[in-house]
Amino acid sequence: MLPTPQTGEPRAASETFDLVVVGAGAGGMVAALVGALEGMHVLLCESSQQVGGTTATSAGTLWVPGNRQGTDASHGDSVHEAARYLDALIGPDDAGGLRQAFFDSAAQAIDYLEQRTQVRFASAGKHPDYLQLPGAALSGRAISPLAFDGRVLGAEFHRIRPPLPDFMVLGGMMVNKSDVRALVRRYRSWPDFVHSVKLVARHAADRMRYPRGTRLVMGNALVARLFHSLRSAGVDLRFGWKLAELDMKDGRAVGARFAVAGVSRTVSGRAGVVLATGGVGHSEALRRELGPAGLAFRSLAADSVAGEGLLAARRAGAVLEQHRENFFWQPVSQVPRAGGSPGLFPHLFLDRAKPGLIAVNGRGERFVNEASSYHHFVEGMLRSKGVESGDSHWLLCDAAFVRHYGLGVIPPGTRRLGTWEERGYLVTAPTLEVLAQRLGIDGASLGATVARSNAFARSGHDPEFAKGSTEFDRFNGDPATPGNPCLGSIETPPFCALAIWPAEAASSGGLATNRDGRVMSAAGSPIPGLYACGNDAASIMRGSYPGPGTTLGPTFAAGYRIGLHARHALAGAPRPSPLSSANELDHDTDLIEHRQPVAPAGNAL
């Protein structure tokens, strides 16, 4: 017998719930939350001691076509235009209609959660899709979580996985893009100064009681809102429960076995089991199988993500669906840590698009539009000859660029670069020739590349890779730069180079599912009682990356549909759903029903 987390009373070694959810990232929390709101007794098991998984360290943005938040903010968008965009990017929908299920459910999932939980979003405003194709949106398609006051969680605040340390300032203060802008411009405008003072004052007060700041933004805010809602909904959440095996009976998932502090524990789920363990993550076997041949790549997944959901489902007869790209990529630099392995800093938007920076390979040549999205930037790295053999790629700029924009973890305003070089993070040199020698690059080639780049900056046009030619490029450039906001010269010594590497931020390949998140068998039929969402499920994007929030938007829609479907599977009386058209309906137990949400709960803030 074990004590329960809430009461300390003994708990049976084997228990029965309506629904068992494995993994407390965004997908698992949404599925568990919807299931509980629909009246089910839900168990949510997390292998680590904190919720959030990889979502906690993300920007927390969701790609949700036709969302209400964008409409309320007067940003025009429609599902029809998003469908045109994905048709142009990926091709037609699959035969099972998974993409259409996403379109039908994504915005409804957000409205459902906002009306019944503490989850809150706002339109991200202008936040362009990543590729210039028919149907692409400039604004309104992306939504972001509202900031959350972590003090509301009380003693449970420590359960929120913190963001990457390099995305916090002053020893633990979270900042988003607008905060960074205000802090950098704090002495240039009164509103920015006031905003900066408020941030610092709040953080100073927090540090008297908490190990880090409690003003949560981005992915941390999203995770905290979901966690707070789970607690309010009465979900049984257990930490340190690592999935060992699915419990299968007559081909049906009826529960799961977990390793808990060295002891095996089995739980049953009347409606089944939801796998949301985070995808491939650090599983060496799955990384070798799904990654580009011979490529040693890093992972931004939480340390606890080890592919156990995919492996357990495979042993139960599930199919692993693969795509042209099985991972969603981000370029990272390695940050030396005292007494430990280096950390990873993802280069998302703060430096690559700015004027006066280029990316070069081991031959000293540019290989990509530096302002392209993180995923497409790494695709350029993978196309660049030499990456398979481990050759480094470099972000190259001059000292003036670092002072103005920063570089990786080096903040704007930095003048003394020696400390960063001594730590092994940066390489500097008084001339390009010396820099090339230190990097092991041909000096003549690097000099010619920089000379061409400087000529492009003077003309305002990049004929090699068209940097600054799209709305997305310019969105992340410097609007104060005349002409092309993404092009600038590299000419003020010392010259600087920062090594970058490909890292996976999420899985695209994963368990094949149908439109309600039911895991498919090799025979092409759903495995009864087995669901998957988040990175455990194959992405509807099939390895393509359309825009901000590509992973989290579909994750919320899938978790929502799973929660509803499981409730009806438990009732044994599924009925057609207004979310699906007649030709979409699965004639097994795939039909779902949408209930009108009750009045919204009060805001947590």
Image (cartoon, rainbow, N blue to C red):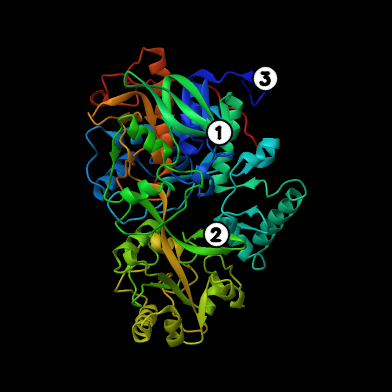
| Residue under numbered circle 2 | 341
The kind of secondary structure element at disc 1 is: loop
Q: Crowding at label 3, few (<14), some or many (≥20) Cα neighbours within 10 Å?
A: few
Q: CA distance from mark 2 to mark 3?
A: 41 Å
Q: Is residue 172 above or below residue 407?
A: above
| Residue under numbered circle 3 | 9
Asked if residue 103 lies left or right of residue 522, the reply is right
On the image, which quarter does residue 244 sit in?
top left
User: Disc 2 or 3, which lies upstream in sequence?
Assistant: 3
> Does the CB distance between marks 2 and 3 fall below 8 Å?
no
User: Disc 3 or 1, which lies upstream in sequence?
Assistant: 3
**Residue 286, image x and y in percent?**
36, 46
* Disc 2 versus disc 1: nearer the observer: 1
Question: Which residue type does callout 2 highlight?
Answer: Ser
Q: Is residue 524 above or below residue 368?
A: above
Question: Which residue type does callout 3 highlight?
Answer: Glu
User: Disc 2 or 1, which lies upstream in sequence?
Assistant: 1
Q: Crowding at label 1, few (<14), some or many (≥20) Cα neighbours within 10 Å?
A: few
Q: CA distance from mark 2 to mark 1?
A: 27 Å
| Residue under numbered circle 1 | 262
| Residue 184 in sight here | yes
**Residue 218, image x and y in percent?**
54, 48
The kind of secondary structure element at disc 2 is: strand
